Image (spheres, helix red, strand yellow):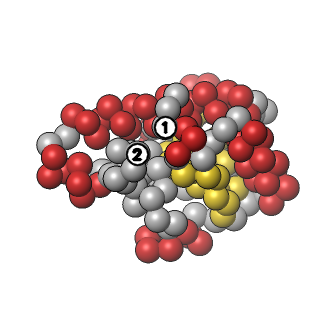
């Protein structure tokens, strides 16, 4: 997957050790840049790092799943990670505006593969847009959605 070495992922997780461990594992697989944040509030809006291509949110409490704030208007694709049965996981991801969802316990390899498929889908979607739409929502280097 050609876009993975140049992609910029934002990993949001309230548990520092788990977040750092997952970031290191993803970097071992060859992801370009994995940034960390404790909460989504800390990086919403203008505080979001420039050229972020994907948001990964790991929720501790299934009842407190953040809505993807970038879901509308050509926003950033997002993956939800939460401990729920498969049906509820799918429902929570759709309601929250996530492109994909994974349950726990989480395998970093599975997340890596899911990141690749979500980025690939985002790239296909951006290519299907008109040139004017693309210039307003994508990063020049990758062709992927950015903030």
- Classify residue 1 as left or right of residue 104: left
Report the side of 49 relative to 145 (left or right). Answer: right
- Label 1 Cα crowd, 10 Å radius (few <14 / some 14-19 / many 20+): some
Mark 1 to mark 2 CA distance (whole Å): 7 Å
**Which picture quadrant has residue 15?**
bottom right
Q: Determine the residue positioned at 50% across, 73% down.
A: 47
Residue 84 x, y percent position in the rendering: 67, 34
Please provide percent x and percent y for residue 32.
60, 47
Going by the image, does 75 lie left or right of 115?
left
Give the vertical position of 13 relative to 105 (above or below): below
Disc number for residue 3: 1
Q: Foreground residue, 90 or 75?
A: 75
The residue sitting at 57% across, 41% down in the picture is: 5
Picture coordinates of residue 1, whole percent (x, y): 52, 28
Left or right: where 121 falls relative to 43: left
Residue at image mark 2 = 142
> What is the secondary structure assignment of the residue under circle 1?
loop
- Going 70% across and 35% down the picture, which residue do you hit? 29
Where is the C terminus found, in terms of image quarters?
Answer: bottom left
* Residue located 45% across and 59% down the image: 51
**Marks 1,2: beta carbons within 8 A:** yes
Tag 2 secondary structure: loop
How packed mark 2 is, by other alpha carbons closer than 10 Å (few <14, some 14-19, many 20 or more), is some
What residue occupies the far right of the structure in this picture?
17
């Amino acid at each position: 997957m050609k876009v993975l070495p140049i992609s910029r992922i934002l990993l949001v997780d309230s548990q520092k050790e788990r977040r750092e461990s997952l970031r290191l594992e993803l970097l071992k697989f060859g992801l370009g840049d994995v940034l960390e944040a404790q909460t989504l509030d800390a990086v919403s809006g203008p505080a979001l790092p420039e050229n972020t291509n994907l948001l990964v949110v790991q929720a501790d409490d299934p009842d407190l799943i953040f809505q993807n704030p970038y879901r509308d208007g050509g926003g950033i694709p997002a993956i939800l990670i939460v401990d729920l049965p498969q049906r509820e996981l799918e429902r929570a991801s759709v309601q929250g505006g996530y492109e994909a969802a994974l349950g726990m316990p989480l395998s970093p390899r599975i997340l890596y593969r899911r990141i690749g498929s979500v980025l690939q889908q985002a790239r296909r979607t951006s290519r299907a847009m008109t040139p004017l739409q693309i210039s307003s929502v994508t990063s020049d280097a990758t062709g992927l959605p950015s903030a």
